[in-house]
Amino acid sequence: HPIIDSGYGTSCLENLRTAGALVLKGFLRHGVVKRLQEEAIAVRPEAFFCNQNHNVYLLEPDPDFPRNHVRNAEQISGKGSIPHDQVPGNSPLRIIYEWPEFKDFLEMILESPLYLYADTLSSININYYETGQQLGWHFDNASFAVTLLIQSPRSGGRFEYVQGSRNSAKGEHGYETVQKVLEGTTSPQILEAEDGDLVLFRGRDTLHRVSPVEEELPRVLVTLNFNTEPGISLSELARQSFFGRLQ
């Protein structure tokens, strides 16, 4: 992928604007994918696993709505995570993340300046979704996500989404759309990604989830996390929840 080519960057920008998701197929070569799969296996014993109950909006329950209303409907998420400071120092993930031209490319197509996290845990994360684990339906608080799919299971572990589910800028919550998805009367789209693909996704207004993994081979996804302002750390509550420690 000629990410230093401005024309290529412009085409990626237009695709992301149109679809809300951009999949760069084969962003990583096969040998690098294999090395990262082996690396993920090696550090897996150090991963912190957690399960969380949350609602679609990732907010505290709203007592003005019934408990079974979509605003409060409970979702379940579970995964294991390796924080930034446990990613091996010679990992290809660090080379990619710290590559200035890669950040320039992201800034162009995400239309925002990007900064590394100020804390030592949050910039690069290796995430494991093992048998029965899933990421429940939700909207992101962040405006974008940058991920590398390292390993996909043969059954389950699909990334599903419903484009244009709400318009948060206009204060729209998309309750009707969310209700149809939770009831199963609206079928989500499947984001087709394979091992080694780079995925950029705008999830603030796009309802999405990772379906439960249905076999022993886990889904391994790396998140490359940036902020749009300097000096920002992940909250202490989030660090404790995701990694089991504050530093």
Image: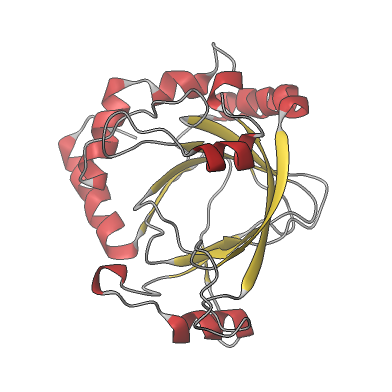
Q: How is the image coloured?
A: secondary structure
**Residue at (27%, 39%) from the top-left corner?**
228
Return the residue nearer the eye: 68 or 196. Answer: 68
Q: Position of residue 107 (x, y in %)?
A: 24, 38
Q: Considering the image in quadrants, where does the C terminus appear? A: top right
Return the residue nearer the eye: 8 or 161. Answer: 161
**Residue at (53%, 74%) from the top-left corner?**
188
Q: Position of residue 51 (x, y in %)?
A: 71, 51
**Residue at (53%, 27%) from the top-left corner?**
121
Name the side, left or right, on which 109 lies relative to 233.
left
Q: Considering the image in quadrants, where does the N terminus appear? A: top left
Residue 21: quarter of image: bottom left
Name the side, left or right, on which 9 lies relative to 69.
left
The number of numbered discs placed on residues in the rendered structure image is 0
Vertical comparison of 231 with 58: above or below: above
Q: Position of residue 76 (x, y in %)?
A: 68, 62
Residue 99: quarter of image: top left
Q: Position of residue 74 (x, y in %)?
A: 64, 70
Name the side, left or right, on which 95 lies relative to 84.
left
Return the residue nearer the eye: 3 or 70. Answer: 70
**Residue at (40%, 75%) from the top-left corner?**
165
As drawn, which residue projects farthest toward the front? Answer: 63
Vertical comparison of 55 with 179: above or below: above
Vertical comparison of 57 with 135: above or below: below
As drawn, which residue projects farthest toward the top? Answer: 90
